[in-house]
Image (tube, helix red, strand yellow):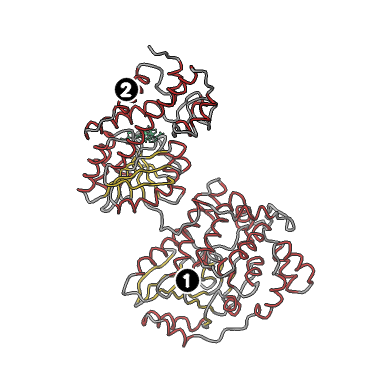
Amino acid sequence: MSDIDIRNQGRAGRITLNRPKALNALTYAMCLAVEEALDRWRDDPAIDLVLLDAEGDRAFCAGGDIAEMYATGSAGDFDYGRRFWRDEYRLNAKLAEYPKPIVSFLHGFVMGGGVGLGGHCSHRIVCDDTRIAMPECGIGFVPDVGGSYLLARAPGRLGEYLGLTAARMGPGDAIHAGFADAYVPRDGWEALKQALVETGDVTGLDAAMAPAPDSPLAAQQAQIDALFAGEALRDVLNALRSDGGDVAAQALAAMSRNAPLSMAVTLEMLHRLRGPSLNIRKALEMEYRVSHRIMEHGDFLEGIRAAIIDKDKSPKWRHDLDNVPAVDVSRMLMPLGKLSLSFKERGMKIGFIGLGNMGAPMAANLIKAGHEVSGFDVAGVTVEGAAQAASAGEAARGADIVITMLPNGAILRAVAAEVIPVMPPGAVLLDCSTVDVESARAVAEQADAAGLAALDAPVSGGIGGAAAGTLTFMVGGSEAAFAKAQPLFDVMGQKAVHCGPAGNGQAAKICNNMILGVTMIATCEAFALADKLGLSRQAMFDVVSTSSGYSWSLNAYCPAPGIGPKSPADNDYKPGFASELMVKDLGLAQQAAEAADADTPMGAQALALYRQFVEEEDGKGRDFSAMLPRFEKRGRS
Ligand code: NAD
């Protein structure tokens, strides 16, 4: 039987969690299934509302299924957990922002991931046995799945109290704290569900509601506000210890079991979040800063080990209760830059063909960002986290985007002929190789004829840029295809320039590299001349790098060893960018210039010189800046 039952019934989209033996713990697959259903029902005129409930007597959902996270995380693979969290948090936001009513029936235990699922819905119903809690600090984590949003909005300092102690709320408390909306006695639930399904109208809820039971927490609110007002964990502990009352003693006992770093971070999160600009996305984004780091730098794995794996209930936390340095808290909450939670839709299905020096790190970055990559390379190489396809066609089948990173235009044409027939309509063929303009345009025409879009998007930035995700893409093709590929450019690079129709990306690349080849030669010539004129290389660099002779070749990639920023010259001219690749690019420029009848004497001269360097001298396998030692050795004749 499936873990989740998703169906249309009357006017309602119905989702029923169906893992009662596991207290309906939410698996990754269940998360994705809920999201898929919500996406489907959003614009379905037959569906007026969504009804979310669970099988079994004991729990609506007692949390996220963390067994797989532990297995992967303790083996040093943090990407699985990060992917799970990213997709789950996107679902939490979707539930909170859904345009149709979602009615959640929260019986029994509703904890962690269960709060994320049922606690952000528009109409949250509780009954007598409801027990809601955010117990994450007990397993070395922090309240997540949007729990920090609910906690930050709870009255007074209740959020701090609930987050740090993991206290369980009955129905009255849950309504008082803002985790639920309506109390309906359990024996009225079936009739209510029936009415909702038949009418698709949530106003029927009013008749089923009963007055909320008392809230013990409301009665303790003033005490809790005083005890949990501290700025940092130490302040809260001091207040609790000096109080001596029952509320303080019980809170202290609960907190002494929880992870000190988790509690300190939770407190800081709530302080930062609370305020007029709070919304669920802001809270989830902050939570994800912690999730991203918690396995590597926090107590999460140790917490799960002690609670669920070894069940020894004796976690060895990283910090003592009284000694959590503020800097450790700040580190957990530092912005993640490009790795921030983005709420982008689920990762694309990507076929990646050509996993060489450039392709492999580019594919790895896409996998890290949550995309599903199927890779193929004739050399049999693979990338961790990618499915290894047996052919280019297999990698491309069903893909939203197929990326190629291949040696030349002839190979690109052959691969395109194999993948275009198997790509689904509307998919994009994104070629990032450096190839001739003609091949790029021919491939684009074939793709167009097959109802696909093609982009030529060669890159600048080299192997370092590919690994760091800081490439620049120069892109030819339609606006629509460019827009579709933009999220991938954002992952693999720092900038993507749309240069116009098909082939214009390659045109930009060829022109850029023609300038690069020419300026490198000019820079190397000038250094060799300066040597002979008795001008020191440092003086030459200092003057030219800030005068009209400056260029990227000199300023960023200086061909003189020991001068300017670090470059291949400082590493015995190991590439970097090999001279033979420069021959290839200058050749492409001349080929294009001939076809377009453009006069490019400097480009032609640069090609001749690099070709001589590679074919007749010692240039092969050396960086293209090794022109400097070449000129050094030579005189005028
Ligand atoms: P590479 O030789 O390391 O990688 C090319 C890969 O393509 C190889 O692994 C090869 O096995 C694979 N391949 C060849 N034919 C194939 C086929 N039919 N099907 C599947 N795979 C096939 O080269 P690279 O350095 O990764 O460069 C790739 C492209 O990027 C080139 O066009 C290059 O000009 C361009 N580029 C390279 C750099 C750089 O610094 N290396 C910088 C910018 C652009």
Quickly name the residue at label 1. 54
What residue appears at the point 36 percent right and 82 percent down from the top-left corner?
Answer: 199
Report the amino acid beneath label 1: Ala
Vertical position of residue 448 compared to residue 4: above or below: above
Nearest the camera: 340 or 352?
A: 340
Nearest the camera: 222 or 371?
A: 222
Q: Residue furthest top?
A: 637
Q: How packed is label 2: few (under 14 Cα within 10 Å), some, or many (20 or more)?
A: some
What residue appears at the point 66 percent right and 65 percent down from the top-left corner?
Answer: 164
Residue 365, horizontal then vertical, whole percent = 45, 45
Quickly name the residue at label 2. 608
Residue 28, horizontal then vertical, whole percent = 47, 58
Vertical position of residue 56 compared to residue 368: above or below: below
Residue 278, horizontal then vertical, whole percent = 54, 68
Q: Secondary structure at mark 2?
A: helix
Residue 1 in view, yes or no: no
Disc 1, ligand 1: is the CB inside 8 Å? Answer: no
Question: Which quarter of the image is occupied by the C terminus?
Answer: top left
The CA distance from mark 2 to mark 1 is: 74 Å
